[in-house]
Image: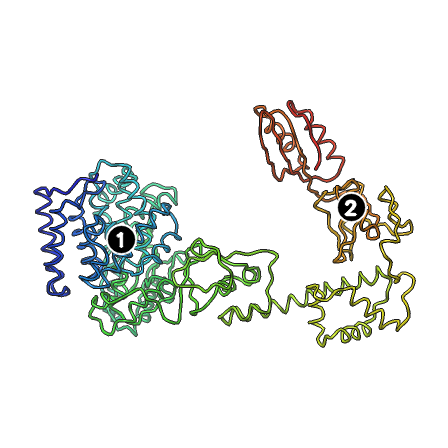
Amino acid sequence: MNEHINFSTEERALALELYSHLKEKMAFSTQEDDELRVRHQLMKAIEDGQVTRDFFGLNPIVSSLQTAIVAVDEIGLRRDAVIAILLRPCVESGTMSVDEISASYGQPVGRILHGLQRIQELYKKNPVIESENFRNLLLSFAEDMRVILIMIADRVNLMRQIRDTTNEEAKNEVSQEAAYLYAPLAHKLGLYKLKSELEDLSLKYLEHDAYYHIKEKLNATKAARDAYIERFIKPINEKLIAAGLKFHMKGRTKSIHSIWQKMKKQKCAFEGVYDLFAIRIIIDCPREEEKQQCWKTFAIITDMYTSNPKRMRDWLSVPKSNGYESLHITVKGPEDKWVEVQIRTERMDEIAERGVAAHWRYKGVKPDGGMDEWLNGIRQMLENTSGMEAMDEFKMDLYDDEIYVFTPRGDLLKFPKGATVLDMAYHIHSKVGNQCTGARINGRIVTFRQALHSGDQVEILTSSTQYPKQEWLSIVKTSRAKSKIRLAIKETQQKEALLVKEMLERKFRNRKIDLEESVMMKAMKKLGYKEASDFYRDLASETLDVATLIDKYVELQQGEKTPVGDNQARSAEEFVLDDHLASNIPQNDDVLVIGKDLKGVDYQLAHCCNPIYGDAVFGFVTVSGGIKIHRMDCPNAPELRRRFGYRIVKAKWSGKGASQYQITLRVIGNDDLGIVNNLTSIISKDEKLVLRSINIDSHDGLFRGNLTVMMGDTNRLEVLIKKLRTVKGVKQVERL
């Protein structure tokens, strides 16, 4: 709204009340003159008229006080975070800079404000927030975990204040962000109370009727629900007391949002949601006896009531990644009603209620999960259980010898310092590592040698033509990657050796030379190789020319005799070229028969002319020893005939075509409405034709298009061309 602040009577009274509450809460943690300086700065900003209301018309000074109360009372933040929250309107209005605040109140306050600014910039660049990736990207941008906690507190307060706003569009947008972004963040950090409030308020604003329908149903059934809980827990209470356990129990009704999600998932009415409430049994016992007493309670309850094994959740043995520990079971109580029972200790319950803040009370809690390992940096700073003072000193500095990076999906991976893109590729999968060509880090393309840094978002890039090399061993830092590279190189060398042997056998057969292993070993040693693996590797990489090997082999096999017969080297000058391709093919040569049964011959269909079954074709022996199959009318045929006539072989198709071949047709015609649809319709109606791609260009009333189609033979091609030529407006159809 850009309306300068003019405090109403209600706002002034509310601000004074909030300020007094905050001052009382913060008295023990602020420095001597913090409160006076902050108050002076806020008054100056108001008097200068720089601070303006937000687009909901809310007073940002009042909002910052309310957010600070949430941060202190419900999360447990202290001095640095509170000052950053209160002075944030001054930074956003330009009356103070982050550097000025850092100089006046210390670097931690400036770092928090800088993190809040970075996230605001990220919002401007990427407005799509419905993803785990975006949530984790926020975490990497925050620099200080208190930034995330402040954002959650701010959104909780905003959701509380916009109940009566008339700006429905902005209200819906804020509510959607609360559901998709802030509630999952609160869940990740274990702030379950705030998470439930965000979800309920977002449902209230986005689906008003559903929210109040469930709320009214809950109110109507409260008395019956309370009576049932009393009947259910009475025998459990007696059994647990008899077992000597120290505990207390309480009932917990599911949140309105949770009930709504179950109704949608199970496609049922409110009455169909059978586990509307849960019984929580909270045991008071020493830390070392926690698991034993929880399982003892589990045994007592399941002896009394039939349990549903499919709905058992054991977060006692393996806690959630955010530190949540509890044992959940669902049992059939009186009247055959299903009831969820949660078993946990006092320590576990506090962690479940207050999340991250409660973790700081318990040094050494180390649940599994990458994100929580990141948060463990906070806990390791604590030397006592006094609470939040250590948080004021905390920076988001990760371990000196470890780094944490995000995958595109938002998963957090840990690597030793100095690890590279290639390390991450092999961490994901051996195949990804073997084919890694680089990565996209924070949107920038880098090589696989690039070192990773904490907070990077890394997407591995691969290519099917890439393969591991010996020098990769000096690039990676992790033993896991090194072992996978060595294994891949060994497997590659073995495959290459087999392929090279097959190629040599084929070459020797073509030259009608008998291949003898003993002579080959002599040739290998004469060429300077001690290891067969090095010999075959150089042949595969073409470092060693096959012709050189054959010459050396023939020399060793026949001594100093001059090669004769089929081994006689011939110059291309001996060939008398004719106008017809067939004249260059010796009449006594065998014909290469192309088909699925052709084995031992490395052949490919040439991309320059894309021959298909039924075309008149010939074979051309390439430098690598393989054969390329060309159409007789290939545009490159005259040049091949003129320069390399001695490398041309006869070829023909075998039997009936059983493969699908790719051909491209050029279509030219009038640019009439619907002509493209008519062309593609003809192809789609034929079950034996597959349209791979279509590229159309229109200019001056004419269109030119290339259609790439998969088909079996030339007969089908001729039929297709005839059909396409019948389309109204088509002037020309030709095969490329």
Q: Toward the viewer: 295 or 464?
A: 464
State the mark number for residue 252. none
| N-term-proximal mark, 2 vs 1 | 1
Residue 152 lies, in percent from the top left, at 26, 53
Quarter of the image with the C terminus in it? top right
Is residue 614 found left or right of 246 in the rendered image?
Answer: right
Name the residue: 34% across, 54% down: 138
**Distance CA(mark 2)–CA(mark 1):** 70 Å
Residue 191 lies, in percent from the top left, at 27, 57
Q: How is the image coloured?
A: rainbow
Up the image or down, 524 lies above or below 332; here it is below
Is residue 580 found left or right of 391 in the rendered image?
Answer: right
Residue 201, image quadrant: top left
Q: Residue furthest front?
A: 573
Q: Amino acid at mark 1?
A: Met
- Label 2 secondary element: helix
Name the residue: 73% across, 31% down: 719
Viewer-side label of 2, 1: 2
Residue 353 lies, in percent from the top left, at 25, 59
Q: Which residue is mark 1?
A: 151
Is residue 693 found left or right of 139 in the rendered image?
Answer: right
Q: Which residue is mark 2?
A: 639
Is residue 46 found left or right of 388 in the rendered image?
Answer: left
Residue 294, image quadrant: bottom left
Residue 427 lies, in percent from the top left, at 49, 64
Q: Amino acid at mark 2?
A: Glu
